[in-house]
Image (tube, grey):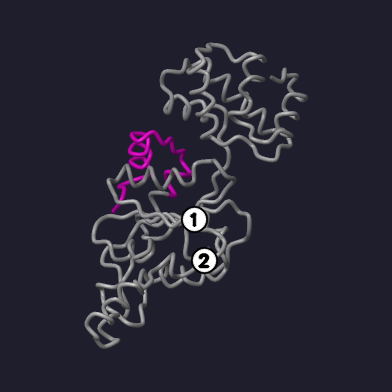
Amino acid sequence: MWFASPDEVRERLAAVDYLADDGIATSVFLAGALGKPLLAEGPAGVGKTQLAKAVALATGARLVRLQCYEGLDEARALYEWNYKKQLLRIQADGEAWEDIFSEEFLLERPLLKAIRSDEPTVLLIDETDKADVEVEGLLLEILSDYQVTIPELGTITATRRPYVVLTSNATRELSEALKRRCLYLHLGYPTPERERDIVLAQVPELPDRLAERLARTVATLRGLELKKSPSIAETVDWARTLLALGRTELDEGVIGATLGVVLKHDSDQSRAAKELGLPRP
């Protein structure tokens, strides 16, 4: 058992500065209790990746991360052979071909590393929706049976199942076959009250009143039609910016001068300045 109850999840994640609501705490608990992967989906910057990191920190588990991207293949996700070392061995010793397909020449990639780990491991498959559809087929065997088949070595079955978290920004629809193997958790932007608490957990030196104003301002910005809404991490960066500048108020002048901390497109800054009546630097 990774966690004894949702309440324990909430307490242990809070101890590593991740504030989990009831939905998150319950999903994290069930993923561990049922031994099923947890698919966390939602817009960029709402804490999906940080959730996996927090679970690893809270449990003292090893974190293994597979960062997905277009063009990711089996060699980068699962394993590959050290061809240079194999060639050198053949040239030096003239060994038979079958002798070079052994553990000595195997290069573990994140998926195989997590499957073969004999210590508690959190496997983070990050931004799954950015990988090609073929990668999902590779994940099906692993997430169904927690095993990997290497033709030259046979089938490797996990002796200790990793805690698996997949994240997705929903840029494309993941297959139903993959979703069936997972518990689903949608993470959206937090309420201003919860974001205030997150900011205070990350930046405890910030005055409560300033954190409250900051969270409500960010919520207002997210209500605009922007190319990229501010993430929670950017809200925290904004709080640290105010401390660095020695600001104790978040007035229109300060917002206008520091808007680049949370809005990274000129068109978004222009829209915010126009809608909120802010001065531009």
Classify 172 as above or below 260.
below
Left/right of residue 78 with respect to residue 120 in the rendered view: right
Q: Position of residue 231 (x, y in %)?
A: 57, 36
Quadrant for the C terminus in the image: top right
Say which amino acid is labelled 2.
Answer: Leu
Specify few, some or many for label 1: CA neighbours under 10 Å numbering under 14, 14-19, or 20 or more: many
Q: Which residue is mark 1?
A: 39
Residue 14 placement: quadrant: top left
Residue position for label 2: 178
Q: Residues within 10 Å of mark 2 (few under 14, many from 20)?
A: some
Q: Residue at x 71, y 20 (%)?
A: 280
Q: Is residue 265 left or right of residue 164?
A: right
Instruction: Find residue 13 and report its horizontal and vertical position in percent.
Output: 37, 39
Q: Earlier in the sequence, mark 2 or mark 1?
A: 1
Please tell me the numbered disc located at residue 92.
none
- How far separated are the C-alphas under marks 2 and 1? 9 Å
Kindly check if marks 2 and 1 are in contact, taking CB atoms under 8 A apart as contact: yes
**Farthest-out residue, bottom:** 96
Mark 2 lies on a secondary structure that is helix
Q: Secondary structure at mark 1?
A: strand
Q: Position of residue 170 (x, y in %)?
A: 61, 54
Q: Nearer the viewer, residue 155 or 175?
A: 155
Please report the bounds of the magenta region as a residue range: 1-27
The residue sitting at 72% across, 27% down in the picture is 272
Q: Is residue 13 magenta?
A: yes
Residue at screen point 57% across, 22% down: 214
Q: Nearer the viewer, residue 198 or 112?
A: 112
Tally of numbered discs: 2
Q: Find out whether residue 138 is within the magenta segment.
A: no
Residue 174 in which image quadrant: bottom right
Residue 240, given in percent of the width and then of the height, sits at: 48, 23
